[in-house]
Image (cartoon, rainbow, N blue to C red):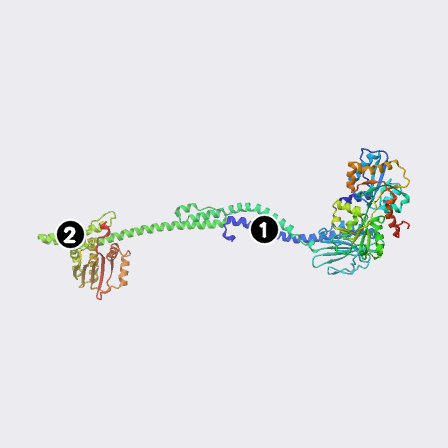
Amino acid sequence: MKRRICLQALALTGVEAMDSVHGASETSLRIGLTPVILADQVAFLSRWGSYLSERTAARVTFVARESYQPILDMLFSDQLDAAWICGYPFVKYESQLSLLCVPLYLGEPSYQAYLIRPKGAANGIGGWDDLRDKVLAYSDPLSNSGWLVAQAQLAKVGISPAELKRTFFAHGHRNVAQAVASRLANAGSIDGYVWETMRKQGMAAISQTEIVWKSEEFGFPPLVTRRGADQPALARVQQAMISMAGDKFGQELLRTLNLTGFTNGKSAMFDSIRAQAKMVSGSGVPA
Amino acid sequence: MLRRLPYRIQIPVGLSLAVLVTTFLVTAVSAKFYANRTRQENLATLDRGVVLIVAQARPLLAADDIWRMFALLRDTAALIPGAVEGKGRLAVLNDEGIVFAASDPRVLETGMEFLGTVWHGQKIAWIDNSPDAQRWNRPDGAVMLLNPIFSEDGQLMGHVFMEIDGSVFAPDWLALSKTAFVSALLATALLLPIGWIIGVRMTQPVARLIAFIGRIGNEPPSKLRLEVPITRDPELGRVAQAIQQLTIELTEREKSEERALSAERLAAVGRITAAVAHEINNPLMGLLTATQTLRIHGDAQPVREQTLDLLDRGLHQIRTTVAALLPQARVEDRPLNPSDLEDVVTLIKAAVTQNNCELHSHIKVESALRVPSAPMRQVMLNLLSNAIKAAGPNGEVSALLEADAQTVFFKVTNSGPSLTAEKFSETLDSESGHDPRGFGLWVCRELANQYLGGFGLDLNTTAGTSLVFWMPNRESIESST
């Protein structure tokens, strides 16, 4: 509840995790956050912002939204200097974006998408081909694991969206888990990293859901900038991110994020997403 | 059970019971009021919740945003009575009557056809473009609401459905019982000592009266009369008055008893005096005759000696009789001698002559006589005197002194009217105290009892009356000691 209130506050009022006075500089960097991470912990973001500020000689703040599109809109309209988005919007808007860095999850710049169902539910869902006439929860229209993967898998098993009883977007992976846990949906397509992080944090929704399917590895949601952005501070941010695993405070922040570090991103990391998007009509990625 | 307890316990216990009963009744009535009020408040809350949801649901229905609708219903349900415990649920239906989202999707599944179906025994009918809400009050106390959602331009967008289980409206007896219990406990804790004090104060006059009543019979009424407890209570005042009256009457009775006792003592003294006079009078006449004989024939030596012996024995008998009245005196009595019968006959002769009758005496003594002479002489004198009177003029009286080793008998027969056993018993009873004039037979019986002998009517005698006196032929216990 507290997290939800905080998230709403961040989303609706644009409250930013303010840098501490100590280490503040005239250069200001705003980084947008999407539901690819559990970004509603204000105290954590404040600590992370301070950490980056101290190492970049810039005032780093985070801006969180519960959907991907507003963050992209803000990024494209120069309201943000960088954004942590999903791999799918990256490949979709790759011509306008540059990779800043890619997180390492379990030591790899990749993750999986999960299909989950209510735990112990006798709803007969054992895979994608069981979703006919069922209610399926997505995360976001611009989410790889929370929409694109589902479209590809449904197409793969020959189920058109119209054959599902109902689908809806839950505005975030965490909400997908909650929707499935509360039986609002019979199944949900979710980011495996988020699900595992929620499980690690002992969130109730996870204990009420179970995984019925795991995808292949996809490139982990990257931090991107507008293509052509030439702020020197961004390079320092990139270096600070990549260096986080090397110092104690950075490791502590990474543990909170359930990540092992950041690395320089390469477009090839997202080939699997790109290939998948090309198979899904309406994905916006030309075949 | 309570009535068996003293007032000082009855009153506080009664007060506590009254508190408990009152608490129970108040709780029951309060519960009813509380239940009604709670129901009205809950229904008002439901109405407000519906208004809130209708307003919030429009844009979400328009945006087809199931998640946010769910979040809205879930958050709103927290305000709806019983929803958190799973006893209430909210749902928004789309314009096709299908569940769009519900606060509890386990019960109202997403995409479930709802309008037009039967839900918990109630047909949920469509609302045909009516802005009015529908409400169903189910027999189990549950309430269901269905409210249409219209767009600003009047298009039906969907419905809000709300259901609250009947148990939500039921009084929370457990909570009420706890409150009642605590109230009763506090009230009892407060009232019990107060009731005890009041009870003790109220019953104090009663207790004083009871204690006073307990003294009646154990203490002199004349003393109690002055100590009757005074009470201001009118009821108890009447009791105290009655007790006062009782002590007065007891005092009077005590005085009457003292007077009666005094009179009885006087009567007893009179009876004793009469008995003594009777016992002395019997030989006295013979002694007077003897003195007359001595005066006339005293010159003759044998007559003088015989008469003086007679006078000596007669006076000894009187002395013995008088001495017997003195408990301290110890009389040295000699054993009976056959000549004692002759003495008695001599002493009674004057009466024989006076009554003009005949007296015959016989002695059949086969063993030594060990019985005391004084009581036997007294018995003989009494029985002969009585027989002479009973025989009447020209009658005959015979006396027999008979003795063997075990018993000494003295039998007197008169020719007078036969005495029946009943008459004999009546005579003995009458002589026992009511008739101071006749003590002869009564004294005989008393002496028989005293010397472990007997006295009675000889029923074998057909003509006249025979009375028999006997006593063991041995020294009396008194004389032996």
Q: Which of the pair A272/B7 is nearer the observer? A: A272
Judging from the image, what secondary structure is the residue with disc 2 in? helix
Q: Residue B167: x, y in percent? A: 69, 55
| Residue B341 seen in render | yes
Total marks shown come to 2
Q: Which mark is residue B10?
A: none
Based on the displayed image, in which of its 4 quarters is residue A74 positioned? Answer: top right
Q: Residue A83: x, y in percent? A: 85, 42
Neighbours of disc 1 within 10 Å: few (<14), some (14-19), many (20+): some
Q: Residue B108: x, y in percent? A: 76, 56
**At x 74% / y 49%, what residue is drawn?**
A207
Q: Which mark is residue B311?
A: 2
**Which chain is disc 1 placed on?**
B
Query: As drawn, which residue projects farthest toward the bottom?
Result: B462
Which mark's residue is nearer the viewer, 2 or 1?
Answer: 1
Same chain for mark 2 and mark 1? The answer is: yes
Q: In the drawing, does residue A181 fall left or right of residue B209?
A: right
Q: Which of the pair B346/B62 is nearer the observer? A: B62
| Amino acid type shown at disc 2 | Leu
Q: Which of the pair A184/A124 is nearer the observer? A: A124
Q: CA distance from mark 2 to mark 1?
A: 100 Å
**Which chain is disc 2 placed on?**
B
Q: In the drawing, does residue A235 fall left or right of residue B311?
A: right
Q: Residue B454: x, y in percent? A: 25, 58
| Nearest to N terminus: mark 2 or mark 1 | 1
Image vertical order of residue A36 relative to residue A186, above or below: above
Q: Which of the pair A224/B444 is nearer the observer? A: A224
Q: Which residue is mark 1?
A: B20
Image vertical order of residue B462 relative to residue A37, above or below: below
| Amino acid type shown at disc 1 | Leu
| Residue A69 seen in render | no
Judging from the image, what secondary structure is the residue with disc 1 in? helix
